[in-house]
Image (tube, rainbow, N blue to C red):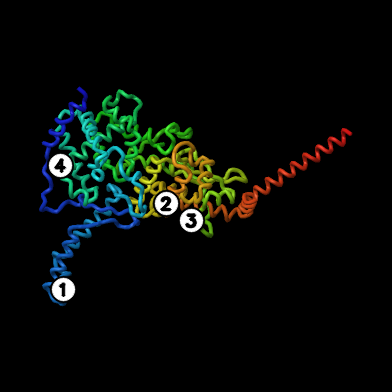
Amino acid sequence: MEPAAAWDRPCELQLANWTVEEPVADLPLPVEYASIDIPSDCGIQAYEYDVQQLLVEYYSAASQHYSTSEKAKISNDSHARSVVNQVLGEFEADMNMMKEKMHRYPTCLGVVDKSYTVPRIVAIGPYHHGLEHLKQAEKVKHVAACHCIRDVQLLEDMYQKFVPVADEARGFYDKDVMEGISYDDFRHMMFFDACFLVQYMAMQGTTRRDRIDGSLQRFLRPNRHDIFHDVMLLENQLPWMVVDTVMSFVADASIPMKFVYRLRYCMQPDDHREPPEEEESFHWDDKYRPPHLLGLLRYYIVGRRSDIHEENPEPKPKNMSFSVSALDLAEIGIKLKANKTMQLLDMHLNQEGAVFTKLSLAPLTLDRDRASYLVNMAALELCTIESFGAATDEDSAVCSYVLLLANLVYREEEVQELRERGLLQRGGGLSNEEALCFFTSFQRLRFGRCYYRIMEQIEAYRENNWTKTKLHAFLHNHKKTIVTVVTSIGAVGGIIGTLLSIKKSV
């Protein structure tokens, strides 16, 4: 019998009978159940407290029963103070959880295409749970759970260990969404979704087909690209502590590391995902605690500043310009170049010899999937980082990278320039027109630290190399005329040489 058939009903019945006492409804919930979504300084999204309604009702009633002189006494009322303190306390608790929360898309990104927000094949977490086109994967989750717990001796003890973690994870999701989901339903959702992610990571992290059950592979492997698209969506995430808890029941604790090792170059073409020649070894950071799988992958896709050669600091420019196109750079003698590390964080201006200066960036194969990865990683940075200026380079690296590419292209000719310089890899993907439309929609992103530094370096180069930039500008703007003149001189020289040779022969 296939594992799927053996697991289907018994598992559902068994989990359904595992109940844990829920928090008493009449008692105040602990701080971890507070919920809010604020995408940094993009603007506060819908944020409603029951206690806010209580405040309105309290003061409304007070205004009807007290005279003006008596209203002044309300502020000293202990009940009113407790309500105010509860509002402030819950808001502060939510602000302190911004890096751990399961965020919704920030409003500052504007209207985002559905292909960048809606899962194609599997819902992870509650935000897309129940969509009709995702229901087939729900059965697969049960099979994945069967394989995760097949070596566990006491299933009920395991589930009792899992329940407190799932209950804590409940506070990381949007409050309005969670109001319609019971505790038991949410625990089961967390458990099955985590098991699915563990089995998917195990499949992607190895080339050995015998490590994963054959029937499960027949679903996961053909759909692996669509599943990867889905697990890279900001609104399709599971708190990592939930995944980590399920991982503790599985024999191979290295599954996440192997998964990241193979997928960290996902921005490159499928046939160019080998580590760069410069990479000596893959460093797994045991101290890093990601909020979810998207956060884990972003951490390694971006790279670390310690892994990148630091250039000597440039003097600060007197004036600043915060945007420059690819043709503008070519005019002042700065050429575009694909870096060798392939890390998004590795963006810098460096001078090669006395003539050429190059702006080095990570190469990108821009198709629908990779455009989605960029959008969602940038959205995560916008949601979790309060101030890019006060944060590290790594915290805003994706926004810096996307904004830099966006400001390099204002015309299709400039998109083509990026292709010719190797920044946009050739092959399948978006056309020049589609790529231009994608990039120009992100020209209003917040300035990341890396972006600001690149703008400083370009302005410092312009100011400190005035003569060279003017010469480059003259050559760039008159190159057709220069080529014509040089060609004409060559032709005239050839004619004169021919005449002289004829004269000598005569």
Which one is nearer the viewer's eye here, 52 or 354? 52
Residue 178 spot, x, y in % from top left: 20, 48
Residue 34 spot, x, y in % from top left: 21, 52
Residue 169 spot, x, y in % from top left: 22, 44
- Nearer-N-terminus badge (1/2): 1
- Identify which amino acid the numbered label 1 is placed on: Lys
- Nearer-N-terminus badge (3/1): 1
Tag 1 residue: 71
Distance Cα–Cα, label 2 vs label 3:
17 Å
**Tag nearer the camera, 1 or 2:** 2
- Nearer-N-terminus badge (4/2): 4
Distance Cα–Cα, label 3 vs label 1:
53 Å
Dividing the picture into quarters, in which one does residue 48 lie? Answer: bottom left
Dividing the picture into quarters, in which one does residue 343 lie? Answer: top left
Q: Up-down: is 277 above or below 182?
A: above
Tag 2 residue: 441
- Secondary structure state at the residue bearing disc 2: loop
Distance Cα–Cα, label 3 vs label 4:
52 Å
Tag 4 residue: 184
**Tag nearer the camera, 4 or 1:** 4
Residue 204 vs residue 88: left or right? right
Tag 3 residue: 322
Residue 144 vs residue 396: left or right? left
Dividing the picture into quarters, in which one does residue 273 lie? Answer: top left
**Tag nearer the camera, 4 or 2:** 2
- Secondary structure state at the residue bearing disc 1: helix
- Identify which amino acid the numbered label 4 is placed on: Asp
- Identify which amino acid the numbered label 2 is placed on: Ser
Distance Cα–Cα, label 4 vs label 1:
45 Å
- Identify which amino acid the numbered label 3 is placed on: Phe
